Image: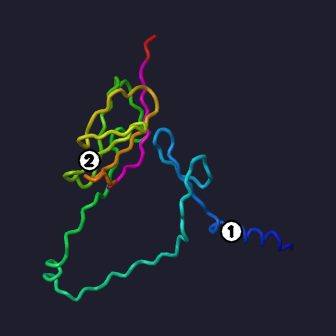
Amino acid sequence: METRPIFILLGLAMATGAFAEAYTWTDQQGVVHYSDRPHPGAKTIDLGDGNSQRPTPVPRSTATQADSEETTAPASVGYESLEVSSPGAEETLWNIEGTLNVSLTLTPSLLPGHQVRVYFDGAPQIVNSANFQLQEVYRGVHNLQAEVIDETGKLMIRSRPSRFYVQQNSVR
């Protein structure tokens, strides 16, 4: 039995993790893509060693609960989730006459001073609430993504991109 193919396969299997690279880029519609193959204009993502991190131990406090309540500063509140609930991902909408009703689900609710920025087909705009309308949405494939920014413009949370379709009946 020849051992060369076994050593070659073993070497390839071991090298796969060592040479793994990932790339990211944003297309013209504002959709972020990830791939293991290079793409024009893509940025390389540093994947690190994968299993090299260890959990940080949490120090045990010897103080009483009353002492810790007095000395502990209030934790900064973050958002748990943000998603485009309507239109649904990959949903086809019929005859909307150019007006798109959008609903976002944000947990917890929008905090004072924070704003929602929506990207419709890559174009950003600020909206006032989690339920709003977009005008001039016509037939075709569209992408929608939302994010919450604080009063300084810092990104707090971003939804996944959502693709949907608009169809219009034609009269012949």
Q: How many marks?
A: 2
In the rendered structure, which amino acid carries the disc numbered 1?
Answer: Ala
Q: Magenta part mainly helix, strand or loop?
A: strand
Give the crowd class for mark 1: few <14, some 14-19, many >=20 residues within 10 Å: few
- Relative depth, front residue between 3 and 136: 136
Q: Residue 4 location in percent, x, y?
A: 83, 71
- Inter-mark Cα distance, 2 to 1: 48 Å
In the rendered structure, which amino acid carries the disc numbered 2?
Answer: Gln
- Magenta-tinted stretch: 156-169
Residue, x 37% and y 49% (percent of image)? 159
Residue 115's disc number: 2
Residue 13's disc number: 1
Q: Earlier in the sequence, mark 2 or mark 1?
A: 1
Magenta-colored stretch includes residue 1: no
* Residue that lies at the very extreme toward the right in this rendered image: 1
Q: Is residue 171 left or right of residue 2?
A: left
